[in-house]
Image: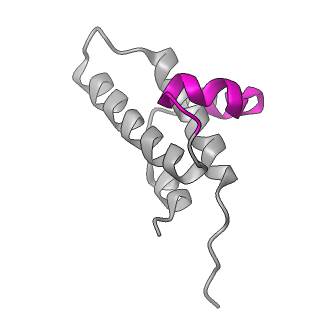
Amino acid sequence: MIDFRALLETLRRPRMLIRAARCGVLDYRRERDLKRLVDSTPTPERAVTRLLAEEERLEDIRLSGEASYSVARHIEVLIALIAEVRLLPRSPTAI
């Protein structure tokens, strides 16, 4: 099983994007927001997988400087990603 928490911690994005996403997590409503981002309401693990793919796509667009980049969409995806990772069960830690 993939450790999505560790993966999320290794993401390197502009500080302002991360700060905006962290602020937005408080208003995240799964049943309202997730459908808009991934066209369904999957399990948290599947949602995280899809959101990671979408975030990577948005990051590539941002880095390339394309005019189609939407900072609002990127923040929405990051908000959902953070919130969905929080819904995942914690992996047992080795002693």
Q: Which residue in the rendered view is the most extreme toward the bottom?
A: 95
Q: Is residue 72 left or right of residue 19?
A: left
Q: Which residue in the rendered view is the most extreme toward the top?
A: 67
Q: Is residue 24 left or right of residue 36?
A: right
Asked which quadrant contains residue 35, the reply is top right
Q: Residue at x 52, y 54 (%)?
A: 9
Q: Position of residue 59 (x, y in %)?
A: 35, 31
Per the rendered image, the range of residues in magenta is 21-41
Q: Is residue 20 magenta?
A: no
Q: In the rendered image of this protein, does residue 60 appear above or below residue 52?
A: above
Tell me if residue 19 can be seen: yes
Which quadrant of the figure contains the C terminus?
A: bottom right
The foreground one among 64 and 44 is 44
Tell me if residue 12 can be seen: no
Q: Position of residue 45 (x, y in %)?
A: 54, 53
Q: Position of residue 55 (x, y in %)?
A: 41, 35
